[in-house]
Image (cartoon, grey):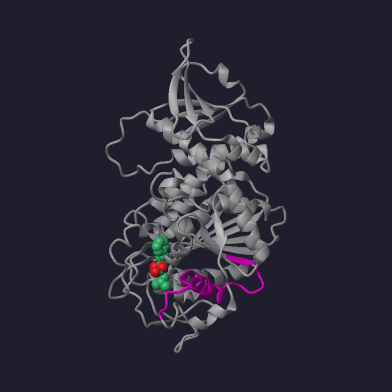
């Protein structure tokens, strides 16, 4: 794994084996190696006008540095950057600056090579020396960036695992492994216990699969007062989404091993909080099942009873995420949470609404909404609100049960809001709650400058939220 090293010396004192990176104001396409008389190599990289660089473009620059270093097989790289050089980053602190550099170096370095049998012969980037750092708080910011970046990459590793290698039971095992070295406790409930709890919606989604449905519970009691109300994170953990009997068309199914990205994100966030030793009480709940096709599978037209006693008319078997989350939201009540965030690759409609640049957030709590938008901007996990108005409830009024899992007229209009509206019927009352539909950020896009596959969003945002909550 890439080592990020805080180096007290100036970049000018860097020795030969390490390439010095020098950012210039030249256009982005202008980059070249320059050899100096003393035998040192400098890589000059144009990043455009520094006065125009924002927090968003700054993160991309950091990622591009790693991609460039990899392309040129640089093994050791030295960088020296200074917040004062970027006037548009004026609102950010030095801590933010160095933590952001570190996180994005690690995120850009990540590759998912687990199943490549022929390892690349190319040289890889082994270390980045961040130069001219002496302040204690800045060195701490680098250490924190390493933790956040590493746990985000752990989350991507779990999310990227194909479904034939990650069943709900394997997901539970991966959760336990993820928490090692932290004070997070993991409990895993199986189908027998879920039946006792009357989690009929979660069980229905998993009933067609060979693999057993599970419910992963991670608890971190980090606050001084163990009775302090916890923050509850809920993550969708569908290890594979075929769509069920309403099967997905080809071209829309192959990446559905990533349908547990919400689950891996909340588990990585609580693990990271544990590693950082946050003085907070935090719970992560992950209902996990495979939405498979078989003669035992849930049918369109079935009516199931959720844990809170409400009956659900299943009009579409591909709207399974909201069903597993419904029971997890009911379960969250027992913790008397201070706030609840649920994270889910819930709807393709979120991509229609926002493209692939931001996750959709839905909440009636405007303070919470504004907070998440702001934290998304500082962490890099952009989120944008959609309304969660009562007007949308009418479409889910079932003829045969208490609620239907999609609009009874089969309309696809406002599909993401429909998902959020369904969840609102199960979220504990009078608790600040926000639904985060991360379907738009499930897979990376070229402009992210990240490896293909999981983006690891919104782990950084969740960690920031937990810190300030
Ligand atoms: N997991 C999908 C949503 C999804 C789609 C995530 C594309 C990422 C990329 C979800 O379970 C689903 O299939 N939702 C349906 C809902 C519909 C049946 C109301 C959808 O989006 O089509
Ligand atoms: Zn689905
Ligand atoms: Zn799904």
Toward which corner of the image does residue 301 lie, by quadrant? bottom left
Residue 421 lies in the magenta-colored region = yes
User: Along the line of sight, which residue is nearer the eye, 23 or 247?
Assistant: 23
Q: Residue at x 50, y 30 (%)?
A: 26
Residue 33, x across and y down, in percent? 43, 22
Tell me how many marks there are. Answer: 0
Compared to 32, does 110 lie above or below? below
The residue positioned farthest toward the top in the image shown: 37
Residue 155, x across and y down, in percent? 47, 50
Q: Quadrant of the N terminus?
A: top left
The residue positioned farthest toward the bottom in the image shown: 399
Q: Residue at x 53, y 29 (%)?
A: 23
Compared to 184, does 150 lie above or below? above
Compared to 158, does 310 lie above or below? below
Residue 115, x across and y down, in percent? 31, 44
323 vs 140, left or right, is left
Compared to 453, does 66 lie above or below? above
Q: Residue at x 68, y 34 (%)?
A: 137
Residue 335, x across and y down, in percent? 63, 66
| Residue range of the region highlighted in magenta in the rendering | 410-434
Residue 139 lies in the magenta-colored region = no
Q: Quadrant of the C terminus?
A: bottom right
């Amino acid at each position: 794994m890439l080592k990020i090293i805080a180096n007290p010396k100036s970049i000018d004192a860097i020795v030969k084996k390490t390439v010095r990176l020098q950012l210039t104001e030249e256009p982005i396409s202008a980059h070249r190696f320059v050899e100096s008389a003393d035998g040192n190599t400098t890589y000059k990289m144009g990043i455009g006008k520094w006065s125009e660089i924002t927090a968003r473009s700054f993160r991309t620059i950091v990622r591009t540095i790693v991609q460039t270093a990899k392309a040129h097989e640089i093994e050791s790289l030295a960088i020296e950057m200074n917040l004062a050089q970027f006037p548009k980053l004026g609102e950010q602190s030095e801590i933010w600056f160095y933590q952001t550099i570190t996180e994005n170096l690690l995120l850009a370095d990540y590759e998912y090579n687990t199943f490549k049998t022929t390892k690349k012969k190319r040289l890889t980037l082994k270390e980045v020396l961040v130069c001219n750092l002496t302040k204690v708080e800045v060195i701490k910011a680098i250490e924190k960036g390493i933790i956040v970046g590493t746990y985000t990459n752990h989350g991507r590793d779990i999310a990227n695992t194909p479904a034939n290698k990650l069943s709900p039971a394997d997901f539970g095992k991966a959760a336990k492994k993820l928490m090692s070295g932290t004070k997070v406790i993991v409990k895993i409930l199986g189908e027998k216990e879920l039946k006792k709890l009357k989690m009929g919606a979660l069980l229905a989604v998993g009933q067609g699969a060979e693999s057993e449905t599970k419910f992963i519970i991670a608890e971190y009691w980090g606050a001084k007062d163990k009775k302090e109300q916890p923050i509850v994170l809920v993550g969708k953990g569908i290890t594979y989404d075929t769509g069920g009997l309403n099967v997905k068309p080809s071209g829309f199914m192959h990446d559905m091993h990533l349908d547990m990205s919400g689950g891996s994100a909340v588990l990585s966030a609580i693990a990271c909080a544990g590693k950082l030793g946050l003085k907070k009480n935090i719970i992560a709940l992950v209902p996990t099942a495979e939405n498979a096709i078989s003669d035992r599978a849930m049918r369109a037209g079935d009516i199931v009873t959720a844990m809170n006693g409400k009956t659900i008319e299943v009009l579409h078997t591909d709207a399974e995420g909201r069903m597993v989350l419904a029971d997890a939201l009911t379960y969250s009540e027992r913790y008397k949470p201070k706030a609840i965030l649920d994270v889910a690759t819930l709807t393709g409609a979120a991509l229609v609404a926002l493209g692939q640049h931001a996750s959709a957030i839905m909440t009636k709590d405007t303070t919470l909404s504004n907070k998440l938008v702001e934290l998304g901007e500082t962490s890099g996990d952009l989120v944008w609100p959609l309304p969660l108005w009562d007007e949308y409830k009418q479409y889910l009024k079932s003829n045969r049960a208490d609620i239907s899992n999609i609009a009874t007229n089969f309309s696809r209009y406002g599909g993401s809001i429909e998902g959020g509206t369904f969840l609102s019927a199960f979220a504990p009352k009078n608790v600040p709650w926000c639904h985060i539909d991360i379907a738009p950020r499930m897979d990376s896009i070229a402009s992210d400058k990240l490896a293909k596959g999981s983006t690891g969003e919104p782990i950084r945002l969740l960690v920031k939220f937990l810190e300030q909550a």
